[in-house]
Every structure is written in structure tokens, then in C-alpha cells.
Image: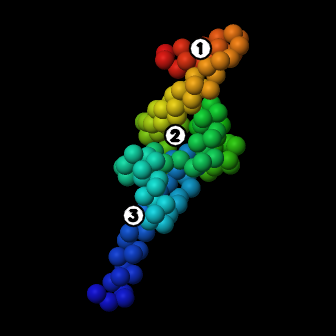
Amino acid sequence: MDCFSLGIDYNKSMASRRITCLITGKSYTYSLDYYNKKVSDYVDEDNLKKYFITQKAKTYLNKGYSIQEIRNILNVNEDDLPGSDSDQVVELIEFHKIQASQTAKKISNTLNFATHKSDQEVSCFINNIRDYEQH
């Protein structure tokens, strides 16, 4: 194999690691190691390519901002992006809600341990959070 064909193979693999945020429209091409880390964060490669969002967009989404509000805050040109009520965006939001709820459960489990001997008001507050998570 010559150097030219190695370059083509490398470029093909770089192109396959290109992912785009459906909220901001920003595209990224990551190194192989970082890309593989992102794949594991998103469970598999299909989910990464389908549901990837930038950290800024994810932060705003987790704070409860709508897709339109996030795009306005980040000055996004929406011309080539799916609408905020499109199936793609609805699925993306659902995926990240599920991911966030799994993280929240891990946090509440540690809260339960850390606050075992708390005063009555704190215990009541924690129980309210636990009840809210279960519904």
C-alpha cells in the first residue's frame, strides 16, 4: 500500500467521524480516541450521529430552554436545520431526557447515603425529590 492510498483511507475514516449538532448546526470531526469515547457516552455510533448535541446546547436543554430559545441565545442560523417540532428534534430531546434521568437517579442515590442522619426538614425535602423522580 502506498502513501497516497493510506491518506485516502485516513480521510475516509475522518469523514466517518464527522458529527453535527441538530440544535446548533455545528459540525465536528474528532480524533479516533475521543470519537470512541463519545460513542460510548451515547451508547453506540448510530445514537451519536443521530442525537449528538454540543455541550452548550445540552446545558441549555437541561436547564429547560426550548430549542428555539437555545438557537436564539447561541445566534444559530436555522436555514438548514430541522424545525424545533420535527421528529428528529423530538427524538433528540427524548434521548437526552432519558440520559439525564439516569444521571439524576445516580445523584439521588448518593444523596440518600450522604443525608442519612439529617434533620427532619432535610429528610422531608429529599423524600420529596425521590417521590418526584419515581413519577
User: Which residue appears at 42% of the width and 50% of the height?
Assistant: 40
Amino acid carrying label 1: it is Asn
The number of callouts visible is 3
Q: Report if the CB atoms under discs 1 and 2 are less than 8 Å apart.
A: no
Mark 3 or 2, nearer chain start: 3
Compared with residue 94, is residue 1 higher up or lower down, i.e. above or below? below
Amino acid carrying label 2: it is Gly
Where does label 1 land, which residue?
127
Whole-percent x, y for residue 44 in the image: 37, 49
Q: Report if the CB atoms under discs 3 and 2 are less than 8 Å apart.
A: no
Measured in 3D between alpha carbons, the distance from the residue under mark 3 to the one under mark 2, in whole angstroms, is 25 Å
Where does label 3 land, which residue?
16
Compared with residue 18, is residue 12 higher up or lower down, i.e. above or below? below
Compared with residue 53, is residue 118 higher up or lower down, i.e. above or below? above
Q: Secondary structure at mark 2?
A: loop
Q: Is residue 96 visible?
A: yes
Residue farthest bottom in this picture: 2
Viewed as shown, does residue 116 lie left or right of 45?
right
Q: Residues within 10 Å of mark 3 (few under 14, many from 20)?
A: few
Between disc 1 and disc 2, the foreground one is: 1
Which numbered dot is residue 3?
none
Viewed as shown, does residue 62 lie left or right of 87?
right
Measured in 3D between alpha carbons, the distance from the residue under mark 1 to the one under mark 2, in whole angstroms, is 39 Å
Mark 3 or 1, nearer chain start: 3
Amino acid carrying label 3: it is Ser
User: Which residue appears at 43% of the width and 69% of the height?
Assistant: 14
Where does label 2 land, which residue?
83
Residue farthest left in this picture: 1
Measured in 3D between alpha carbons, the distance from the residue under mark 3 to the one under mark 1, in whole angstroms, is 46 Å
Whole-percent x, y for residue 53 in the image: 53, 47
